[in-house]
Image (cartoon, rainbow, N blue to C red):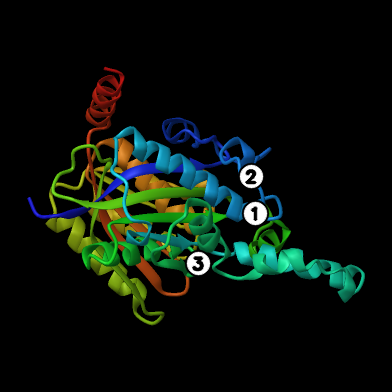
Amino acid sequence: MTKQVVIKGIGCITPWGDIVEDVIRNDKERSLDTNLVKDFDLQKYVKRKGLRTLPKSTKMAIASTELALKDLDVLGYKELPKERIGVFVGTSLSYVNNIQDFLEPTYEKNANSVSPIKFPNTVLNNISGWVSIVFGIEGINSTVNNGTMSGVDALIQAQSYLESNVIDRAIVITVDDIDKAIVHNKNNGKRQDQTITESSITFILEQSHTLEGSYGLIKNVEAWMNPYNSIERLQNVISTRLRGISSIEYVLWGSENGIDGNIERQLNAIYQGEITKTSDFLGDALSSSAFYKIMIALFSSQNSLIIETNNMGNQGVFEVESVVVTERKEIIHERKELSLI
């Protein structure tokens, strides 16, 4: 078997908890309000000084990465040189919150009220930079800001660096916190009861000759940006995948935008299998939208097709090949038993 990029670890901080299995089971309660991670305390996950002034998005990314590394550690992964590990972050609008938090005192009082401590939080790569600092990572450090497609594009970038042997492990994070800047941005000119979900999800990717010990893999990724014929191309890609690949058992879609209606009509016309519209219960999950779909697909133990879109012409279609979760748990249990002998 040739080497493939597989998912070896998952960590998440969500409004429904930080245990992946619980999130998959319990996150389908529809809400007309904003889904927030309440009472979040980074000290519960990482006990380190100097993190108190970081924005919530960065703290959540650090926490979900800590959980993903612990998940990977259960499999007894080998240590790698720090320069052979890369950090890839996809975020939609969290930096908007950070900029507002930095500048708000200026508007309310005067420029002398601005805290210089908060200035680094306004930098777009604040999240990826702090994850690297906290975990001592010295490899490539990248942030993608591309709306709902940020997570997908961060994954594509990570896979490229792994397949090119620039790095041996990729930590890929999607994160967005929901503060008044984002709420204003998302609801400006839209219905005021639009659901928005904040969260941070981390996947750890490695190349492997086998799927053993992994959750599965993401494959056959097609992603593009073309605001003119993007919907037509998207429809053609979906049609080709569903009519040409008999192994697809499950379709996950829904990005809470104007393209959803076109996708729904097409799926109803050509696909008779299982379908889940994740935006029905997540609303707009921003950059984490695709990662929620991937988690659901991995724990479904089915071969899935995932469709992720945004209104700017950025579209992505890819497949998830899932390892039966019970098999992975047996492997983890066996390795835990061996460690106790």
Residue at the (43%, 64%) spot, across then down: 149
Q: Secondary structure at mark 2?
A: loop
Q: Secondary structure at mark 3?
A: loop
Query: Which quarter of the picture shows residue 233?
Result: bottom left
Q: Is residue 171 visible?
A: yes
Label for residue 36? 2
**The residue positioned farthest toward the left in the image shown:** 1
**The residue positioned farthest toward the top in the image shown:** 341
Image side of residue 92 versus residue 302, left or right = right
In the displayed structure, would residue 315 be above or below residue 322? below
Q: Residue 256 appears at what percent x and percent y?
A: 50, 57
Q: Are marks 1 and 3 in contact (CB under 8 Å)?
A: no
Residue at the (38%, 49%) spot, across then down: 203
Instruction: Name which of mark 1 and mark 2 comes first in the sequence.
Output: 2
Residue for badge 3: 147
In the displayed structure, would residue 18 be above or below residue 263? above
Front residue of 296/244: it is: 296
Q: Secondary structure at mark 1?
A: loop
Amino acid residing under circle 3:
Gly
Residue for badge 1: 178
Q: Is residue 194 visible?
A: no
